[in-house]
């Protein structure tokens, strides 16, 4: 009995510390997104209201996800598991909408010649489509493993990191990075995953396998962007879309 009490207290302490860490990561992601798009708004020479409807829907869905991600982690810290599970269904619906709108908005940006000047259209297409697809895969996997908290929270974190790239791209001096612009965005996203790994090592003594899978999706996405972004089929597709 004494041994059980002795070992139980440290385990509860680690769990509480872990929950606070994931809330801090959620807040850091939210802050990055707010800073990125605030900087973008300050540089804009056009009216946000003049943008196409799908852009507004896209912004609303992605903003809702970031807000919900913070709230969900806050509920876990508070111990409000019932509310966390109920809001999970809403999150699943938002995630589906995000994937669809992410692809639709990217395609329409190419059709309307709204591609950022520092990205070749092919790279832009593959970058956005693979990013939101990777988000969808990791989020769906996290939902399937929702009863395995250690896997669930880490896959959710990695999935959310994948949709940070537009905000990061608005913070970094992308024109100055030239051909390394995409690599710069990847490096910043990787730092968030590495932060999770470091916390695991310090609190658990090892990196949880979920980070290797989530980080692997991030790395695979980066590699495929380089391989597919300038490939003839993608270039032909971009040319047709922009015609």
Image: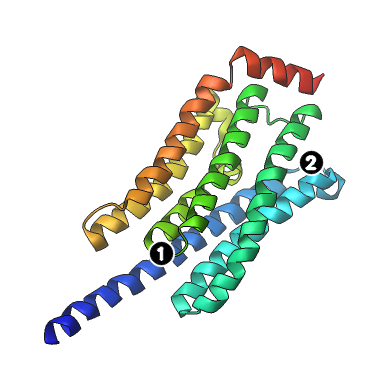
Query: Which residue is nearer to you in this view: 77 or 148?
Result: 148
Indicate how the structure is coloured in the image.
Answer: rainbow
What whole-number distance in Å separates the C-alpha atoms at marks 1 and 2? Answer: 45 Å
Q: Is residue 107 above or below residue 97?
A: above
Residue for point 46% across, 39% down = 218
> Image check: 87 left or right of 152?
right
> Image check: 92 left or right of 108?
left
View extreme (bottom): residue? 1
Query: Which residue is nearer to you in this view: 71 or 135?
Result: 135
SS type, badge 1: helix
Residue 207 appears in view: yes
Residue 167: percent from the left, percent from the top?
A: 59, 46
Residue 53: percent from the left, percent from the top?
A: 84, 47
Residue 190: percent from the left, percent from the top?
A: 42, 42
Q: Residues within 10 Å of mark 1 (few under 14, many from 20)?
A: few
The image quadrant of residue 51 is top right
> Image check: 194 left or right of 122?
left
Q: Is residue 107 above or below residue 132?
A: above
The image quadrant of residue 64 is bottom right
Name the quarter where the C terminus is drawn. top right
Q: Which callout, 1 or 2, points to the residue nearer the camera?
A: 1
Residue behind mark 1:
149
View extreme (right): residue? 50
Residue behind mark 2:
45
Residue for point 68% across, 31% down = 116
Residue 169 appears in view: no
Residue for point 82% across, 42% down = 46
């Amino acid at each position: 009995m004494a041994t059980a009490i002795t070992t139980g207290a440290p385990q509860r302490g680690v769990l509480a510390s872990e929950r606070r860490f994931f809330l801090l990561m959620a807040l850091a992601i939210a802050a990055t997104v707010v800073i990125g798009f605030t900087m973008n708004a300050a540089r804009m020479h056009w009216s946000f209201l003049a943008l196409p409807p799908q852009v507004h829907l896209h912004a609303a869905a992605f903003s809702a996800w970031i807000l919900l991600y913070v709230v969900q982690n806050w509920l876990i810290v508070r111990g409000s598991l019932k509310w966390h599970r109920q809001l999970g269904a809403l999150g699943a619906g938002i995630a589906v909408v995000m994937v669809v709108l992410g692809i639709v908005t990217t395609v329409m940006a190419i059709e309307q010649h709204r591609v950022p000047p520092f990205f070749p259209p092919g790279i832009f297409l593959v970058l956005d489509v693979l990013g939101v697809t990777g988000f969808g895969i990791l989020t769906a996997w996290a939902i399937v493993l929702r009863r395995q908290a250690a896997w669930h929270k880490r896959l959710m974190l990695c999935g959310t990191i994948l949709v940070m790239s537009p905000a990061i791209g608005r913070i970094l001096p992308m024109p100055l990075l030239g051909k390394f612009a995409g690599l710069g965005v990847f490096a910043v996203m990787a730092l968030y995953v590495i932060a999770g790994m470091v916390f695991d090592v310090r609190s658990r003594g090892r990196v949880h396998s979920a980070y290797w899978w989530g980080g692997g999706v991030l790395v695979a996405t980066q590699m495929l962007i380089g391989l597919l972004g300038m490939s003839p089929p993608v270039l032909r597709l971009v040319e047709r879309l922009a015609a």
